[in-house]
Each structure stands twice: as structure tokens, then as C-alpha cells.
Image (spheres, grey):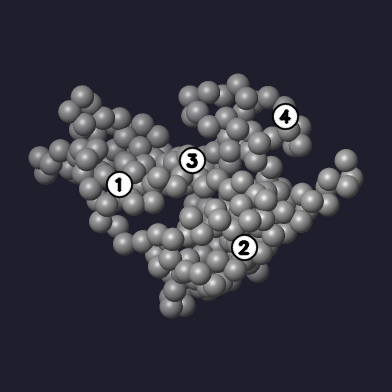
Amino acid sequence: LIYMKLMLDQANAAQVQVRKQNFINYGRDLTLFKGVETWFDRINRYGKASGLRVSHHIISSGIREMILGTSIKKHFKDIYASSYCFDHHGVATWPALALNYTTKTQFLFRINKGEHNVHKHDRINQYIAPADRPVPFTNMIFIGDGETDIPCFRLVKEQGGHSIAVFQPHTPKARAKSKQLLADGRVNFIAPADYSQRKPIDLIVKAVMEKIAANDYVKRFKA
């Protein structure tokens, strides 16, 4: 929150108004990783063929309005990210929400329990049997690339889901950090951030989806 406030202070000192539209415009110009544009439809089709209903969510420490400017925003059921308060002119006036290491995990529970409205908390605090939760942790695949993702990596993995650390392709230092996460048992897999068909991340996610579908099929015989 202090960092977000500092950004506003610096802009005000330079007599620059920070507008919601500025963030959205910035998001439109972001260069996405290779394969991201076709990723969502491809994974959705694969899930449907496997008998799965796939939903995509973002939990980000970045600015929500930047994400809203990207071409892939339409694919997300939820966009949980840091954001500002804006006045009636669309000018940022104060930090409204900041996501960090630990606050990110609460949104996993929102997805898990089906309480997507950030202004409602009753269902989050209620005990709901794992079998009755709309999105079991065992059916989650969490993909992250930063240090603020580590608590989510660990939570999803420890709850029986699958965590994947991605790194900038052809960047040895980034790869080394991901390998350390794997060695520390915080993630299940690591892969370069190339989302093209038949690249490692594509193959890993599809394999996990097949595993989820198979586990669900086996459970039917135990019921």
C-alpha cells in the first residue's frame, strides 16, 4: 500500500494525473509470452474433451486495471489484483487493495469455496466439507513466476493440487530460482514461460488435467 501511495505522490509532484485509462492503455501494449493468446481456448477444448470444466483466474500483485487492458482479460472468471480508488474523473486518489505474499492465498480459498465477491466473507469463514467445495484444491493448477507466488505454490501443492513455477525462457538466473523452488518442495514442476502447443508447460498442464479426470472417474466406483 505504501509503495502504491508513493507512486501517486511521485506523479502528483510531477503534476501528472494517474488515470484508470492510463493503466488500461498500458495493459493493451504489454507483450505477452509466446503462446498465451491461444492458450485459453486450447486448454478449454482439451478439458472439455477430458470431461472437465475449466475456469481461469488471476491472482496478481500487479495493477488490476493493467490486466483489464490486455487482450486476454475475457478469459478470466476472476481478476484479483492490486487496485486504486478512482474519483469521478477516473483519477487515482488512494490505494484500495494491495496483494502480497500472504494475502494472495485468501483468493485461492475464495475460488475453492465459490465465494468470488471480495466484499463477502461469510462463506469464507464457514466450514464447508472438501467434497462440497466448487473447486477442490486437488483440481487446481497454480502457475506463477514470482516470489509473491511462493505461499500459493505451497498451499496448492500441500492440499493435493499442482503448482508450476514458470521462468523467462533463456534466462539462467530465473531458471535457477525455479529449480530451487522445485528442490525445496514448493512446486511440482518448472517450465519455461512459453505457452505454445506441445511446449513443456502445455504438456504438463494437459497431463495434470488427464490425471484429475482419471481420479474423478475412479472416485465414481468408490461412491
N-terminal of the pair, mark 3 or mark 1, is: 1
Q: Which residue is mark 3?
A: 77
- Three-letter code, disc 3: Lys
Q: Identify the disc placed on residue 204.
A: none
Distance from the alpha carbon under mark 4 to that under mark 3? 22 Å
Who comes first in sequence, dot 4 or dot 1?
Answer: 1
SS class, disc 3: loop
In front of the other: label 2 or label 1? 2
* Helix, strand or loop under label 2: helix
What residue is at 49 percent from the left and 40 percent from the top? Answer: 77
Crowd band around label 4 with a 10 angstrom C-alpha radius: few (<14), some (14–19), many (20+) = few
Alpha carbon separation for disc pair 3 and 1: 15 Å
**Label 1: which residue?**
69
Who comes first in sequence, dot 2 or dot 1?
A: 1
Name the spot of residue 129 as percent of width and height, x first: 76, 32
Residue at screen point 67% across, 55% down: 50
Residue 12: horizontal and vertical position, in percent? Answer: 15, 38
Which quadrant does the N terminus fall into? top left
